[in-house]
Amino acid sequence: MHRLWAASVFLFLYLPLVVVVVYSFNDSRLNAEWVGFTLGWYRELLRDGDMLKAAGNSLAVAFISSLISTLLGTMAGIAIQRYRLRFLNFLVMAPVAMPEILVGVSLLLFYIQLMDMSLGMLTVVLAHVAFSVGFVAVVVRVSVASLDERLFEAARDLGASPFEVFRRITFPLILPGIIAGFLMAFTLSIDDFVITFFTAGVGFQTLPLRIYSMIKISVTPEVNAVSTLLMMLTLFLTLVAMRLAPDALKGKA
């Protein structure tokens, strides 16, 4: 009985994704019925200049914001674990716990009313850094918590400076967690819609925003095709991150 319920839940979650993938190969402009198999919609994507530009914007934003988030999140994760800074833990995790629409609206008001900034790539990058830092910090904190403190004590007894301890011991040991945090930040950034919608402005479009604008007109197999590629990329990066830091992504300390 438990297996039946579990199978039903997974079917409910993943069947719509399977339908999206299958209909990306449908040889018809309408998704009302299956006509035949084709790869034409994927070839159509390669000729869609607006889609390629949006994809390039998404990759650029995801890469830049992930680098910044990884740097800040690594420092925050180490500080939270080593020095038990509860206030820092609260500050870092607050954007993660807040509803995305609240974060998006707050950042929009901050950019326009307080900073008088023009919305564009910079505002999107900063917004993605704000909500990605917390995820990186969690992964790195768990990686640091799994280390044996006797290694650091032995290094200090041998005359190593704090920087040498970090460079020779701490950093190599937590590097898989740092990479996993980067991949998680990259995945969250490239998939984000709500916060990006409020902070991108009129002249800047990412891939989720482009897909949304296409869906408002009609759901063609081209939308299914780009959604399939985005889904595959997200699943791949998530699996790599889980492989690098399984305990961190499961929340084990």
Image (cartoon, rainbow, N blue to C red):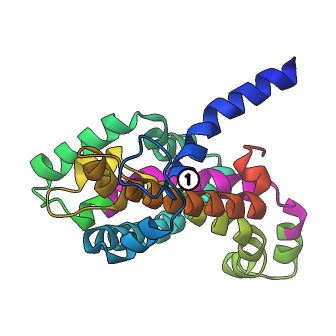
Kindly identify the residue that appears in the image at 81 percent across and 82 percent down.
159
Q: Is residue 73 in sight in this rendering?
A: no
Answer left or right for 105 relative to 18.
left
Q: Which residues are magenta?
A: 125-151
Q: Position of residue 40 (x, y in %)?
A: 44, 69
Q: Which quarter of the figure has residue 153?
A: bottom right
In this rendered view, identify the residue nearer to me: 173 or 227. Answer: 227
Give the prevailing secondary structure in the magenta stretch: helix
In this rendered view, identify the residue nearer to me: 203 or 144. Answer: 203
Answer left or right for 152 relative to 219.
right
Identity of the residue furthest to the top in this view: 1
Q: Position of residue 2 (x, y in %)?
A: 85, 20
Which residue is denoted by mark 1 in the rendering? 21
Q: What amino acid type is highlighted by mark number 1?
A: Val
Q: Is residue 145 magenta?
A: yes
Kindly identify the residue that appears in the image at 41 percent across and 40 percent down.
32
Answer left or right for 201 relative to 52.
left
Q: Which quarter of the figure has residue 172?
A: bottom right
**Relative vertical location of residue 183 with respect to residue 77 in this rendering, above or below:** below
Tell me the quadrant of the picture where the N terminus can be found: top right
Q: Secondary structure at mark 1?
A: helix
Q: Is residue 80 in sight in this rendering?
A: yes
Q: Is residue 14 magenta?
A: no
